[in-house]
Image (tube, rainbow, N blue to C red):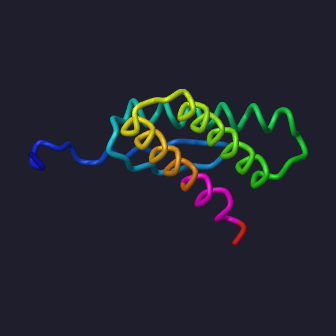
Amino acid sequence: MADSAQPPQKITKQIFGESYTIVGDASSSYINTIADYVESRLAEIAASLPNASKTKVAVLCALNLADELYQLKEKGLEPAVTKEIEDRTKKMITLLEEGIIGDIY
């Protein structure tokens, strides 16, 4: 069964003015969709807070995404579904931290 697993997908994507190489088990189409969603959320927050640092925008974005996840959990989705959503959200937050916050340290 492990032999039928697809190899991880690797794409390069611009998010919030930075280039990221994203590796994931999902399809490249899905990874692009998620990256575009994160980009749109970052742009939305940056537009409402034009003087905010990239770090502040990234943290606020992470909080918004975590809020969305929490609201989905509250709706009583199956534990396996919420676990997958949570894992993917954590991966996206890690990418944000490594790419945006990591530049500071």
- Please state the horizontal and vertical placement of residue 85, each as a whole percent of the image: 46, 39
Q: Residue 33: within the magenta? A: no
- Is 2 above or below relative to 74? below
The quadrant holding residue 46 is top right
Range drawn in magenta: 95-103
78 and 27: which one is in front? 78
Residue occupying image coordinates x 61% and y 32%: 71
Residue occupying image coordinates x 88% and y 40%: 50
Judged from this view, the residue extending furthest toward the bottom is 105
- Please state the horizontal and vertical placement of residue 79, each as a whole percent of the image: 40, 38
Q: Please indicate whether residue 2 sits to the left or right of residue 75 in the image.
A: left
Residue occupying image coordinates x 66% and y 46%: 62
Q: Quadrant of the C terminus?
A: bottom right
77 and 2: which one is in front? 77
The number of discs equals 0
Q: Provide the major secondary structure of the magenta segment.
A: helix
- Please state the horizontal and vertical placement of residue 67, each as a whole percent of the image: 66, 38
13 and 73: which one is in front? 73
The quadrant holding residue 11 is top left
Q: Please indicate whether residue 42 sits to the left or right of residue 96 in the image.
A: right
Q: Please indicate whether residue 11 sits to the left or right of residue 96 in the image.
A: left
Q: Quadrant of the N terminus?
A: top left
Judged from this view, the residue extending furthest toward the top is 75
- Please state the horizontal and vertical placement of residue 75, each as a whole percent of the image: 54, 27
Q: Residue 102: within the magenta? A: yes
Q: Please indicate whether residue 16 sits to the left or right of residue 95 in the image.
A: right
